[in-house]
Amino acid sequence: MRVIIRQNGLETPLMQRRLIESWDEVAGDIIAKYTTEKYIRNQDLCVHIENPALRSEISMMKTELIRKLNNAAGGQVIREIRLI
């Protein structure tokens, strides 16, 4: 099954989808509540956070969040989180 997914070029999109869907669980309920938009562009996860204080907190947690999100996705999907 995995070979078929890879041959059809679907592995990366599936991993990206898993990563985005895992944001709420990995980031936590409070951050998820203030997250209004998230997408991946050029291996960067772009996340819109409505609360400025949370943006600051996320900036300090970026390395750990990137590690946990990539683990949840099943591989190296993102290298950076950009707060928009």
Image (tube, rainbow, N blue to C red):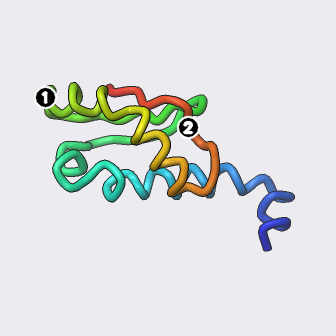
List the residue tagged with mark 1: 53
From the viewer's perspective, tell me whether residue 48 is left or right of residue 75. left
Residue 25 image point, x, y percent: 33, 58
- Image quarter hosting the C terminus: top left
What is the spatial separation of the Cα atoms under label 2 and label 1, in whole angstroms? 24 Å
Question: Residue at left 55%, top 37%?
Answer: 78
User: Total number of numbered labels?
Assistant: 2
* Vertical arrangement, residue 16 with respect to residue 84, above or below: below
What residue does disc 2 label? 78
Instruction: Estimate the x, y position of residue 72 in percent, counting from the top left.
Output: 51, 57
Q: Residues within 10 Å of mark 2 (few under 14, many from 20)?
A: some
Choose the circle earlier in sequence order: 2 or 1. Answer: 1
Residue in the picture at 33% in, 41% down: 37
Q: Quadrant of residue 10?
A: bottom right
Residue 6 coordinates in the image, percent (x, y): 80, 58
Hey, which quadrant is residue 24 in on the image? bottom left
